[in-house]
């Protein structure tokens, strides 16, 4: 579900694509041709041809019974194309398979930009300002953060707010609803319970448009940090938002006494960890899910397994991913690991559908440590809702829209 400051936010307002309509029409025409040809055989080729055709249909009926297929008229049997006497089954299956694959690849390109080898390429962000710059003063009750529960990049920002124990007097938040059908662009809309507090916009695209002075054509992603007084966008890059919130006082006179997510003595270690965690895991799971060739998937899946193994090795020696204290590096790893068993492994096939966090004991212990011992972490996400959103919203990956029974907190964290 995602993302999008992740690609999931890139989901367009989906209607049935014209190439799918073409495929359906093609299959209907094939069915009608088969029906017409059967009638022609019966009327003009004489009783012998008709008798042979009936015998063949009888044999097909016997085969159908042997395969346990019912002739009950109440059953939906599709177009009844398979196993017909006129159109070879291989032609029907091959046409449908290639047509569906073509449509799927086009939809995947809409959702997640691809290179020529079928590798997902994450787009860049358009707003990367920082609180504390001359144009964005470090004041209390000045900034508003728009987030969405399913999105891992939004989760980074929410985790930071919760772990730092920022209050409503310091920064206010709005939780967006993930609904690409209602959204005019992207996937985020405002709900009745949490409307847009600045412009009363219907969706995030409308807010981007108003904050940009109209005619906005870029990506409408979350998280989105906004200066309420100037009504300007500060940033929509999650890593910059995390760093800015950690540095900013936002009117807090006791800033130096709170947890520091980016301590100077660990800066080098945190930066190095952030780099490989992003490549192998944060972005790696999306490279698996959005790959459109086997080679692209194989490479991404190997990276994910390497990333999980590397985390497990590091955490066999350290309490946290960049040392013995909870830092920004843990903030960036947590959203991926919390969603891994419920969405990334089963839906994205990240690392292989059989891979689970529990397969890596030190990584799993770290997850439990963060969830139960670090204040604010367990308040930052609704895991079942987040994972279910991937199945609801990512139509090309789950066209049937079936949502599997979701894993609970105890299933994932233990």
Image: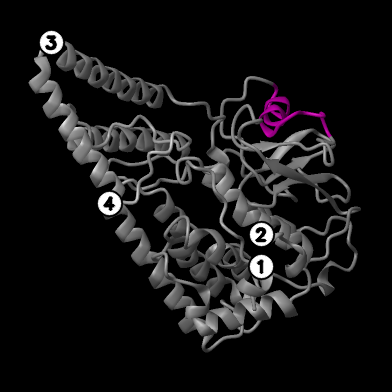
Residue 311 drawn above or below residue 122: below
Instruction: Look at 60% across and 76% down and name the residue there.
Output: 266
Instruction: Look at 54% across and 37% down and name the residue there.
Output: 11
Q: Which residue is mark 2?
A: 384
Q: Which residue is mark 1?
A: 408
Where does residue 303 sit, x and y in percent of width and height? Answer: 37, 65
How many angstroms separate mark 1 from mark 4 (CA)? 42 Å
Callout 1: helix, strand or loop?
A: loop
- Please tell me the numbered disc located at residue 44: 3
Where does residue 16 sit, x and y in percent of width and height? Answer: 48, 26
Screen quadrant of the C terminus? bottom right
Looking at the rendering, which quadrant does residue 186 occupy?
Answer: top right
Count neighbours of disc 1 (C-alpha within 10 A) and say few if under 14, some if 14 to 19, many if 20 or more: few
Of callouts 4 and 3, the N-terminal one? 3
Count neighbours of disc 4 (C-alpha within 10 A) and say few if under 14, some if 14 to 19, many if 20 or more: few
Of callouts 2 and 1, the N-terminal one? 2
Q: Are marks 2 and 1 in contact (CB under 8 Å)?
A: yes
Of callouts 1 and 4, the N-terminal one? 4
Magenta stretch: give its range.
Answer: 198-213
Q: Which residue is mark 4?
A: 66
Single out the mark in the foreground, 3 or 2. Answer: 3
Instruction: Look at 48% across and 80% down and name the residue there.
Output: 360
């Amino acid at each position: 579900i995602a993302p999008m400051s992740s690609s999931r936010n890139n989901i367009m307002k989906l209607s049935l694509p014209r190439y799918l309509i073409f495929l359906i029409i093609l299959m209907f025409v094939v069915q009608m041709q088969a029906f017409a040809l059967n009638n022609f055989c019966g009327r003009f080729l004489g009783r012998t041809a008709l008798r042979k055709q009936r015998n063949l249909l009888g044999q097909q009926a016997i085969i159908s019974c042997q395969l346990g297929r019912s002739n009950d008229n109440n059953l939906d049997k599709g177009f009844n194309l398979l196993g017909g006497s006129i159109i070879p089954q291989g032609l029907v299956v091959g046409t449908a398979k290639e047509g569906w694959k073509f449509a799927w690849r086009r939809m995947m390109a809409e959702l997640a930009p691809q290179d020529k080898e079928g590798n997902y390429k994450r787009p860049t962000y358009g707003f990367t300002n920082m609180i504390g710059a001359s144009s964005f003063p470090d004041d209390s009750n000045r900034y508003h953060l728009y987030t969405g529960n399913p999105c891992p990049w939004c989760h980074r920002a929410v985790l930071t707010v919760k772990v730092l124990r920022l209050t409503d007097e310091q920064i206010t938040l709005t939780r967006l609803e993930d609904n690409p059908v209602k959204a005019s662009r992207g996937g985020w809309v405002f709900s009745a319970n949490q409307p847009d507090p600045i412009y009363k916009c219907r969706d995030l695209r409308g807010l981007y448009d108003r904050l940009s002075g109209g005619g906005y054509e870029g990506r409408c992603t979350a998280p989105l940090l906004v200066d309420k007084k100037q009504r300007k966008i500060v940033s929509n890059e999650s890593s910059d938002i995390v760093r800015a919130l950690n540095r900013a006082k936002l009117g807090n006179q006791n800033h130096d006494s709170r947890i520091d997510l980016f301590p100077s003595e660990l800066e080098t270690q945190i930066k190095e960890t952030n780099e490989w965690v992003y490549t192998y895991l944060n972005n790696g799971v999306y490279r698996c899910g959005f790959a459109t060739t086997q080679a692209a998937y194989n490479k991404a899946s190997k990276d994910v397994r390497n990333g999980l193994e590397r985390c497990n090795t590091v955490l066999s020696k350290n309490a946290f991913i960049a040392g013995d204290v909870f830092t920004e590096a843990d903030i960036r790893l947590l959203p991926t690991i919390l969603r891994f068993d419920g969405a990334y492994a089963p839906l994205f096939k990240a690392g292989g559908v059989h891979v689970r966090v529990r397969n890596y004991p030190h990584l799993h212990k770290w997850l439990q440590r963060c969830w139960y011992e670090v204040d604010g972490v367990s308040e930052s996400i609704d895991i079942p809702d987040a994972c279910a959103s991937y199945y609801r919203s990512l139509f090309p990956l789950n066209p049937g829209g079936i949502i599997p029974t979701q894993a609970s907190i105890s299933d994932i964290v233990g």
